[in-house]
Image: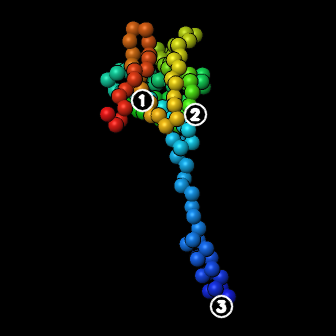
Amino acid sequence: MRFLFTLSLLLLSTLAHAEFADAPTPQSDGYGVLIISRERLEVGSPCDIGLYLQDQLAARLWQGQSVAFNLPPGAISVRLGLLGPGVCSPGISQATSILVDLVPGEIRRYRIALNTTGLYLLQAPALNQ
């Protein structure tokens, strides 16, 4: 019994003096944050909007939704397209992509908008402004 008590005290004293490293954050690892929102008034389509990063479907956005990605710095190809059956299916048309250049620690915000040429990204003001 005395042995268990001594062992537990030794273990507790070791843990009390141990130094724990801070948990890494996306910004400390050199990542940037890309936030894309689909506001209710910007795009009134009943269709889902597909968000493609580097030509891979990364998110499906409904009205009022937002999505955030922790991404490595550099140029990221972003493409938008309508998803769903019927009128939402664009057929064989290929949406154009834009390049978003992220730097480490940066938080970049965009809103999805619609004009006569189709869907596009509209840069939104930073949260801290």
Secondary structure state at the residue bearing disc 2 = loop
* Callout 2 amino acid: Pro
Q: Residue 64, position in %: x, y?
A: 37, 31
Q: Looking at this rendering, what residue extends furthest in the bottom direction?
A: 2
Q: Residue at position x 54%, y 53% from top?
A: 23
Kind of residue sitting beneath label 1 = Arg
Does 99 sit left or right of 66 as displayed? right
Say what amino acid the circle numbered 3 marks. Answer: Met
Q: Earlier in the sequence, mark 1 or mark 3?
A: 3
Query: x and y percent of residue 56 in the render?
Result: 60, 25
Mark 3 or mark 2, whichever is nearer to me? 2
Say which label, 2 or 1, has the lower sequence index. Answer: 2
N-term mark: 3 or 2: 3
Q: Is residue 101 left or right of residue 113?
A: right
Query: Is residue 18 depicted above or below 50 in this figure?
Result: below
Residue 1 circle label: 3
Which label sits on residue 72?
2
* Callout 3 secondary element: loop
Label 1 residue SS: strand
Q: CA distance from mark 1 to mark 3?
A: 61 Å
**Quarter of the image where the C terminus is located:** top left
Question: Within the image, what quadrant is residue 21 found in?
Answer: bottom right
Q: Which mark is residue 90?
A: none
Circle 2 or circle 1, nearest the eye: 2
Where residue 110 sits: x, y (%)? 42, 26
Can you give x and y, in whole percent of width and height, for residue 27 in the image?
51, 41
Count of numbered badges drawn on the protein: 3
Q: Residue at x 57, y 27 (%)?
A: 74
Labelled disc at residue 109: 1
Q: Quadrant of the N terminus?
A: bottom right
Quick check: can you spot residue 69?
no
